[in-house]
Image: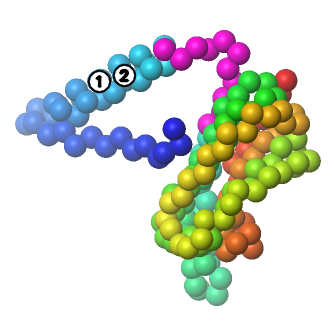
């Protein structure tokens, strides 16, 4: 659910400039996605998904943080969150990473476990089944065992 997805057109280009296989794959993907969206019940569902990109950070000519993107998803209805999670993909290694989830404009928070070691990508997903304060609900990506803030991605929770 929270995996990064990339669509690449590897279809052959003919002499007339049309793409055969790439267009067919794209159409099949659109039809499948439309079918999946139609099969999901829309009543009383309120979910949010979003990306936040961050730029590389330099200190004294040394890159201390690679560029990347943070994905954050909340599944629930109103102020009740069933599942929340996030992941990141970075252009270089991030070490000892964790996600901090905040709710109600920062009035409450919870931390994920720290993923020890260094990686270009990590993922967290938690089943929560709880009500949270209304307001901003954010995922903050941290590195270096909660010492270096990397990026924040937020949604709005309402009743």
- Give the x, y percent position of residue 98: 67, 62
Q: Which mark is residue 28?
A: 1
Q: Which mark is residue 32?
A: 2
Q: Please say whether residue 100 is visible from this viewpoint.
A: yes
Q: Is residue 41 magenta?
A: yes
* In the displayed structure image, the side of residue 52 where residue 112 appears, left or right: right
**Quadrant of the image containing the C terminus:** top right
- Give the x, y percent position of residue 141: 68, 59
Q: How has the structure been colored for display?
A: rainbow
- The residue drawn where x is 45% and y is 20% is 36
Figure quadrant of residue 27: top left
Figure quadrant of residue 12: top left
Location of residue 68 with respect to 158 vertically, above or below: below
Location of residue 148 with respect to 46 vertically, above or below: below
- The residue drawn where x is 49% and y is 65% is 120
Dot 2 crowding, Cα within 10 Å, few <14, some 14–19, many 20+: few
Q: Which residues are magenta?
A: 39-49
Q: Is residue 88 magenta?
A: no
- The residue drawn where x is 76% and y is 50% is 101
Q: Please say whether residue 56 is visible from this viewpoint.
A: no
- Give the x, y percent position of residue 25: 25, 30
Q: Which mark is residue 1?
A: none
């Amino acid at each position: 659910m929270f995996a990064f997805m990339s669509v690449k057109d590897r279809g052959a280009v003919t002499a007339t400039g049309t793409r055969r296989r790439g267009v067919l794959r794209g159409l099949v993907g659109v039809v499948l996605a439309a079918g999946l969206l139609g099969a999901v019940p829309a009543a009383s569902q309120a979910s949010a998904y979003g990306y936040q990109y961050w730029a590389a950070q330099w200190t004294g000519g040394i890159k201390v943080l690679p560029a990347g993107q943070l994905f954050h998803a909340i599944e629930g209805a109103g102020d009740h969150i069933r599942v929340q999670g996030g992941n990141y993909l970075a252009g270089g290694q991030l070490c000892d990473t964790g996600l901090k989830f905040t709710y109600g404009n920062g009035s409450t928070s919870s931390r994920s476990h720290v993923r020890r070691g260094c990686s270009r990508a990590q993922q967290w997903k938690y089943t929560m089944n709880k009500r949270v304060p209304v307001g901003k609900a954010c995922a903050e990506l941290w590195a270096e065992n909660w010492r270096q803030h990397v990026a924040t991605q937020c949604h709005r929770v309402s009743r």
